[in-house]
């Protein structure tokens, strides 16, 4: 989370001139750099977080985090997920596309909103995603799950892009939701109370 055929890969390889040092394109969802707004029309903020999870296995944690249909088990706002389609990334990796619905309370009133998400696995223990929401809000997330003594360590770098008047609210809500999600992830695998870090 491979749709390019071997023949297609061979055709691309054969099109590179002999002796040329052609760099492979980097999939946007798997980029290790931050996703600033090159046009300068939106504000950009980011945060990082990590959590150690005793007794967990890398594969089990990656399976949960890379499947938005299961994220409702740990994400505090997620109410509904519909998988729309799958497409091939520039390197042949599979990008899964989803329509997602969050529910939250704003000024004491219940609010629901939909957004689209693209997600893929970017190699062993790595997950990349991009959520897009009206008006012109993007949230990029790069997660890695690595072995650690007695369990695993999960790290996340999240980039927020939003129109300046909406950034403070967008960043606060997104950061709080992702922090809670990591606390709930740990609780799910260790049996500790939700919210414990």
Image (cartoon, rainbow, N blue to C red):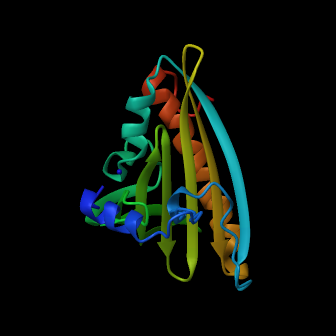
Q: Residue at x 57, y 75 (%)?
A: 137
Residue 140 relative to residue 125: left or right: right
Nearer-the-camera pick, 55 or 171: 55
Q: How far across and how far down the image is residue 126, in percent?
A: 50, 44
The residue most toward the top is 150
Q: Is residue 195 above or below residue 129?
A: above
In the picture, which quadrant includes the C terminus? top right
Nearer-the-camera pick, 110 or 126: 126
Asked if residue 108 can be seen in this view, the reply is no
Nearer-the-camera pick, 91 or 166: 91
Q: Residue at x 38, y 66 (%)?
A: 14
Q: How far across and how far down the image is residue 86, in percent?
A: 28, 64
The residue most toward the front is 18
Question: Which quadrant would residue 7 be assigned to in this image?
Answer: bottom left
Question: Which quadrant would residue 2 be assigned to in this image?
Answer: bottom left
Q: Is residue 177 above or below residue 95?
A: above
Q: How far across and how far down the image is residue 59, in percent?
A: 39, 31
Asked if residue 119 can be seen in this view, the reply is yes
Residue 165 relative to residue 118: left or right: right
Nearer-the-camera pick, 163 or 28: 28
Count of numbered circles in the view: 0
Q: How far across and how far down the image is residue 83, in percent?
A: 27, 62
Q: Residue at x 42, y 38 (%)?
A: 62
Residue 46 relative to residue 72: left or right: right
Q: Residue at x 69, y 47 (%)?
A: 48
């Amino acid at each position: 989370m491979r749709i390019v055929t071997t023949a297609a890969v061979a055709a691309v390889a054969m099109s590179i001139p002999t002796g040329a040092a052609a760099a492979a394109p980097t999939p946007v969802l798997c980029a290790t750099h931050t996703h600033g707004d090159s046009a300068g029309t939106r504000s950009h903020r980011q945060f990082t977080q990590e959590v150690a999870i005793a007794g967990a296995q890398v594969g089990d944690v990656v399976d949960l985090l890379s499947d938005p249909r299961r994220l409702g088990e740990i994400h505090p706002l997620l109410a509904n997920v519909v998988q729309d389609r799958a497409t091939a990334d520039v390197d042949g990796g599979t990008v899964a596309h989803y329509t997602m619905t969050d529910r939250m309370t704003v000024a004491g009133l219940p609010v629901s909103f939909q957004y689209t998400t693209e997600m893929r696995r970017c190699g062993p223990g790595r997950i990349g995603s991009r959520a897009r929401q009206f008006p012109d809000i993007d949230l990029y997330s790069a997660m890695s799950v690595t072995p650690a003594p007695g369990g695993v360590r999960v790290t996340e770098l999240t980039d927020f892009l939003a129109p300046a008047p909406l950034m403070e609210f967008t960043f606060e809500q997104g950061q709080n939701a992702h922090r809670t999600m990591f606390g709930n992830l740990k609780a799910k695998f260790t049996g500790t109370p939700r919210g414990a870090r």
